[in-house]
Image (spheres, grey):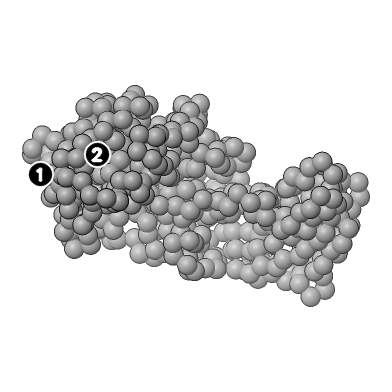
């Protein structure tokens, strides 16, 4: 349910500062603000990215992590009987090192299953046996290390009927109770959830989920909570969100906001960012108002690691941090909704950033570019500064005037591109030489 960052050299991007100074996170990390309210604040992560700035933010700001893809069936058992736990183990180890919970995601789903499972025909008994073995193997491997599991993911259609899937078609709706029972047997201490999207407000789909959970509780099936994914569109937070959370809580189960993001039509601008901040505030406040709403997890914390642009073309900017790991108004909105200081930049504030990337490279030279973007601010002129610590040298530049003294590089706008409006951007490029290594430097605007 997410898209991975491109690993190619051309997509390496440096974290940068605002035109008015570097954007800083709130004085108190989100995880600590959440803890004071009795809430776990989490993020979905990719194991290979848990280093550098990404790893620092993930470990500092959040009290829980959810593997975005690493624990799905297609990832852990791509060939029958052949398991790959590398990334899942890496995420669990990261969480342990940072004193975080892990939310397991997901055991039973209609997507991202291995081809060996979805191809061919099996009897219901054979399919049930495979499902039980998968759940027992994965939950058993991480017994005592996973706080909660999204056991069953997205079982319903929009009208509240059961989705036609490999599982429901062969096993009927009883597969849900069986999956929960098998997961509980494998780890009796893990909290077990049913997770779905478009169930944030009171509607046909959320009512079907409500009736299912009520029935499971009456049957004595181990069900501890419901997950409301909350993949939202700008300005469309359901007015019945808190009411819906409360009715599930009244059944005697916990509620988690499991995959929160708020997507907008690009490009982002200060008005859209202010609305996004208000939307995050609404969701967090609704959860904070219900004692049994125990977890608020964003589906990736940075726009550079969001699934939205590849799934919804033309939409993006859905997370609390921008592509350069700078906190957006949404971040401060979350902090304030959790009781943080209102002295942080208010919703609607923003800045201008510069992203450095290497677009091509050969044995002695390279071509690079810097993109300057503004959101909630504008520029009438600009200067981009960075340091070539590995000894690189600028040899030619276009759309900017660049000078280099020792390792220090400074590039100023050309006469025709100094103005960068709110929501706009400019790009300049250059050629350079390198020897030994060519790391991406951090750029500041001044």
Q: Position of residue 279 (x, y in %)?
A: 40, 58
Dividing the picture into quarters, in which one does residue 374 lie? bottom right
Number of numbered discs visible in the structure rendering: 2
What is the residue that sits farthest to the right in this orientation?
Answer: 405
What is the residue that sits farthest to the top in this orientation?
Answer: 144
Q: Alpha-carbon neighbours of circle 1 within 10 Å: few (<14), some, or many (≥20)?
A: few
Q: Which residue is mark 1?
A: 215
Q: Secondary structure at mark 1?
A: helix
Comparing 251 with 70, the one in front is 70
Q: Secondary structure at mark 2?
A: helix
Dividing the picture into quarters, in which one does residue 125 lie? top left
Residue 282 lies left or right of residue 11; in this view the side is left
Q: Quadrant of the C terminus?
A: bottom right
Indicate which disc residue 245 carries.
none
Comparing 285 with 315, the one in front is 315
Q: Position of residue 159 (x, y in %)?
A: 18, 63
- Taking the spot 33% from the left edge, 52% from the top edge, the residue there is 111
Q: Which residue is mark 2?
A: 131
């Amino acid at each position: 349910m997410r898209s991975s960052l491109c690993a190619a050299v051309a997509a390496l991007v440096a974290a940068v500062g605002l035109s008015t100074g570097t954007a800083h996170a709130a004085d108190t990390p989100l995880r600590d603000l959440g803890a004071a309210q009795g809430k776990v604040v989490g993020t979905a992560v990719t194991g290979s990215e848990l280093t550098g700035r990404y790893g620092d933010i993930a470990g500092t700001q959040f009290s829980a992590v959810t593997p975005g893809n690493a624990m799905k069936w297609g990832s852990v058992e791509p060939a029958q009987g052949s398991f790959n736990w590398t990334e899942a183990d890496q995420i669990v180890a990261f969480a342990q090192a940072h004193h975080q919970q892990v939310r397991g995601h997901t055991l039973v789903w209609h997507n991202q299953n291995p081809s060996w499972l979805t191809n061919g025909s099996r009897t219901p008994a054979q399919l049930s046996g495979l499902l039980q073995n998968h759940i027992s193997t994965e939950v058993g491997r991480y017994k005592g290390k996973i706080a909660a599991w999204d056991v069953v993911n997205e079982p319903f259609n929009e009208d509240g009927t059961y989705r036609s899937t490999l599982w429901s078609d062969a096993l009927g709706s009883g597969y849900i109770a069986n999956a929960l029972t098998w997961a509980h047997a494998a780890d009796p201490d893990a909290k077990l959830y049913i997770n779905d999207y478009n169930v944030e407000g009171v509607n046909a789909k959320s009512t079907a989920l409500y009736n299912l959970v009520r029935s499971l509780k009456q049957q004595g099936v181990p069900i501890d909570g419901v997950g409301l994914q909350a993949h939202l569109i700008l300005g469309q937070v359901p007015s019945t969100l808190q009411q819906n959370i409360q009715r599930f809580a009244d059944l005697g189960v916990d509620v988690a906001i499991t995959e929160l993001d708020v997507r907008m039509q690009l490009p982002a601008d200060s008005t859209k960012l202010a609305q996004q901040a208000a939307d995050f505030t609404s969701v967090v406040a609704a959860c904070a108002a219900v004692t049994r709403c125990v977890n608020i997890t964003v589906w990736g914390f940075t726009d550079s690691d969001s699934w939205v642009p590849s799934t919804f073309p033309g939409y993006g900017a859905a997370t609390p941090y921008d592509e350069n790991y700078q906190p957006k108004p949404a971040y401060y909105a979350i902090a304030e909704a959790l009781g943080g200081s209102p002295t942080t930049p208010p919703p609607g504030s923003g800045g201008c950033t510069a992203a450095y990337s290497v677009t091509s490279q050969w044995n002695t030279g390279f071509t690079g570019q810097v993109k300057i973007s503004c959101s909630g601010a504008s520029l009438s002129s600009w200067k981009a500064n960075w340091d070539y610590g590995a000894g690189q040298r600028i040899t030619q530049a276009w759309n900017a005037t660049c000078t280099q003294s020792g390792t220090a590089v400074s590039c100023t706008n050309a006469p025709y591109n100094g103005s960068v409006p709110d929501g706009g951007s400019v790009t300049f490029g250059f050629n350079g030489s390198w020897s030994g290594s060519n790391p991406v430097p951090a750029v500041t605007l001044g």
